[in-house]
Amino acid sequence: MNSVTTATTNRGRPGYAREDVIRIAVDQFNTHGYEATSMGALATTLGVSKSAIYHHITSKEEILVEATDQALEALFDVIEEADATPGTAEDRLAAVISGATRVLCEKPENVTLLLRLRGNTEVEKQILERRRLITRRFIDFVASAQEEGAVRSTLDAGMVARLTFGMINSLVEWYRPDGPISPEELSEIMPDFVFRGLAAR
Amino acid sequence: MNSVTTATTNRGRPGYAREDVIRIAVDQFNTHGYEATSMGALATTLGVSKSAIYHHITSKEEILVEATDQALEALFDVIEEADATPGTAEDRLAAVISGATRVLCEKPENVTLLLRLRGNTEVEKQILERRRLITRRFIDFVASAQEEGAVRSTLDAGMVARLTFGMINSLVEWYRPDGPISPEELSEIMPDFVFRGLAAR
């Protein structure tokens, strides 16, 4: 967990590279909670002085913004790609489900941090607002597939979108990329499971 | 959020009833994180002295154990009821999905606390072990429905169980019992969504 490559390239100083500091900070936030982790505790974990961290990072919030940004940007990319997917609204919805699954497999730590945010500060509220934007776009994809007739219109689009996201988001809790199901398999299984359910017939 | 009925019945002392202290503590844990919430901070929120809290509760862990117990016991009850459900394995799986949905609607705060536990202490590890027991039993229900032929056997039972639980658990993040979908409706929709998926055809 704490194995890092000590880099000497970042701003020409020896010690941890900036991305290592962020990665380990995210790990600490996810293990002990964002609010319960101080920059001092982070310095202790890294085995460096606080000033060595402040050489890279101006605040705990800066780490939070940057780490959640990586998850949010990847999810916005998925939406953009799905928007550009030719074919039916069902195809585009499948692309979003599949793409979001891939992001969760690739950046579980960043997504975990994003999902656990409570919105106690102004910066957290802004991050949550971007997260909500993704949910709203996802609801649009469901609604379009309903208008097309591919998705049952008896189900509320907002409910379907949130339940499906809930299912995908749960991956951060239990999914292991080195387990029996590969990320590629999973991103194929997921839209199929959402569309067809688990019934054999 | 902090509106409480001041009770004078509990152990015959004036002030908060024990269940109020626990309820408000759970709310604080969920808002600021379990580790970040001290008994002192809880006392401040309640507007009482620390000793007034220690009159009811011996430790923060006692609150954690009791609050998560309420969620765990309710879920074990659901499993027991499902075990006793006559009919097919599919009926029993549907009963578990429906029952778990009901518990999430009824005790969202307790379940949230249970889901956010990180397992940093021995007590937390024990609670997580009981949570895992529920997951394992849920996997059994899926596997039985697969043996019966009701559920596609191409899907891994562990994966299906965890994804379905992920979907149900997501309710604590967005579901409002006073919104357009009632808990009763939701516990009917949920097994249907899991079995049939969202495809119209």
Image (spheres, coloured by chain):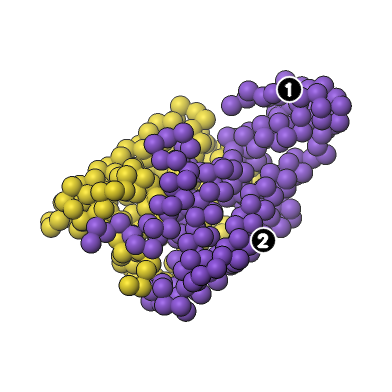
Chain colours: A yellow, B purple
The type of residue carrying mark 1 is Thr
Residue B110: horizontal and vertical position, in percent? 62, 44
> Of circles 2 and 1, which is in front?
1
Task: Kindly state the secondary structure of the residue where label 2 is placed.
Answer: helix
Residue A177 picture quarter: bottom left
- Judged left or right of residue B147, residue B34 is right
Q: Do badges 2 and 1 share one subunit?
A: yes
x and y percentages locating residue B25 in the rendered image: 68, 34
Height in image: A118 above or below B3?
below
Q: Which residue is denoted by mark 2 in the rendering?
A: B129
The residue at 23%/62% (across/down) is: B201
- Give me the chain letter of mark 2: B
- Residue at x-position 79% and y-position 40%: B59
Percent x, y for residue A127? Answer: 40, 35
Disc with the residue nearer the chain's start (2 vs 1): 1
Considering every residue shown, the one lying at the far right of the view is: B12
Q: Is residue A20 visible?
A: no
User: What residue is shown with label 1?
Assistant: B6
Question: Residue A23 or B6: which is nearer the viewer?
Answer: B6
Q: Provide the secondary structure element on which disc 1 rests.
A: loop
